[in-house]
Image (tube, rainbow, N blue to C red):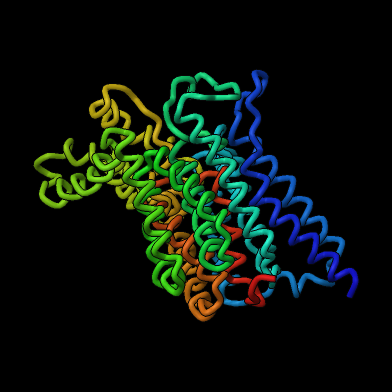
Amino acid sequence: MGDRIKLNRIITICIYATVIIVPFVYLPFIFVYDFFYWPKYMALVFISTFLLIQVLLNLDRMHTLFKFDWINKLLLTYFVLITISLFFSLDPITSIQGRINRYDGYTTQVIYMLLFLFARNISVIDKRFIKLVAISTTVLSIYGIMQYLGFEPFMRDLTRLYWKAAFSTFGNQNFFGSFLVLQLPFSLYIISVYRMKWGYLSYSISLLALMMTSTRSAWIGFAISFVFMFILLLRKNNHYKWIVLVTLFILFGFNFMTDSHMISRFLSIFKDANVLLTTSYQSNPEVIDRLGSVRMFIWVRTLELIKMRPWFGFGIENLDIAFGQYYYEDTIKLLGRYALSDKAHNDYLHIAVSSGVPSLIAYCGFLLRSAYESFKTLDQEINVLFFASILGYLACLFFNISVVSVAYILWIYLGLLTRYKTTEVQ
């Protein structure tokens, strides 16, 4: 019994630390080539390896750590399919280890799955974890706001030397935006459930940072998670009026501060949608291709690539190779130069083109089964929090990409949402 409690405690501490501490792993030094992605990737390698060693030291607990329910069966199916896809990859080495500055290869996918499986063993969520997530997000948001305002306390690399956007320790404003989509619901939870006033400050700072990323997909994702939380949680107490008021104050205040740039960028979503619905691709392909910051150009051609290799794709992290082989001239024609397209900018299309349509079906089946099981436990407020966070992020991934600096948090939250014993916080 003592060894069992000790192992559970080790797993809990490691999982909590991964969410709270790893986002801060950032090395802005002149002798480091990659400030953002490699350090976080190595931190995940270290944590997952440490946890695996603990399992090997407690093999008698294997059957309780990794239960064979439907969620895990679908995850196993996805794992098998992406493993098979390695044998059909254009560049198997890159598929296994991932591209430089991405580190999102097969080994990283396995790390995500392991973190998910370990997170499912945490039956009771600690209140201190919820609070620390909100606090750490606030600190990272303050750093992002400082960057937006032109004050950078750390060294910048040449790529980001003149960027005016909030990207914090994540290397890109889109990635920071998707991180905030995952974390902002925690401040709302603290306000609504714990009724702590400092939650308003945390929420305001993080929401302002989200606006400063100028990431439309993140805005959409957070809007969805906010509405979900509002319906199931926030409107149940009197705090929702203040939450709405603070939200509107931040949004309109930032829009005024940027001379209506925010509302113009937001309305561009509907403008692009209108062009897409009223314009024929056959008659105006270049107009369509330029929509969504050239996302439509990538999506249309990614769909063609999926048709070429529907079963096992071109290989994890091999999209840039396939794009270069088939659409080099198209890219030159549209942009006037060749730009690397290593991600589909829609995570679901990216899975299909990388490891095949069956793997996408297995992955979506895994998500849907997780959602189905979670619906049974939404009477627990903590599960509303995790569901809202995950829902907003998955919506964001329709227009964004999965990256090693953020995606591990999604998998941990999925594990916490579908934990084996769905017990409230303590």
Residue 136, compared with residue 131, is above or below; it is above
Tell me what residue is drawn at x 75 percent, y 57 percent. Answer: 13
Q: Is residue 87 visible?
A: no
Which quadrant would residue 256 be assigned to in this image?
top left
At which x and y percent is residue 36? Answer: 59, 33
Q: Is residue 81 left or right of residue 50?
A: left
At which x and y percent is residue 100? Answer: 57, 32
Picture quarter with the N terminus: bottom right
Q: Is residue 160 left or right of residue 120?
A: left
Q: Is residue 250 left or right of residue 21?
A: left
Q: Is residue 284 visible?
A: yes
Looking at the picture, tell me which residue is in the foreground, 197 or 174: 197
At which x and y percent is residue 16? Answer: 69, 56
Q: How many marks?
A: 0
Tell me what residue is drawn at x 65 percent, y 70 percent. Answer: 425
Direction right: furthest residue: 2
Tell me what residue is drawn at x 71 percent, y 51 percent. Answer: 17
Picture quarter with the C terminus: bottom right
At which x and y percent is residue 196? Answer: 58, 60
Which quadrant would residue 361 be assigned to in this image?
bottom left
Tell me what residue is drawn at x 28 percent, y 36 percent. Answer: 261
Looking at the picture, tell me which residue is in the foreground, 43 or 123: 123
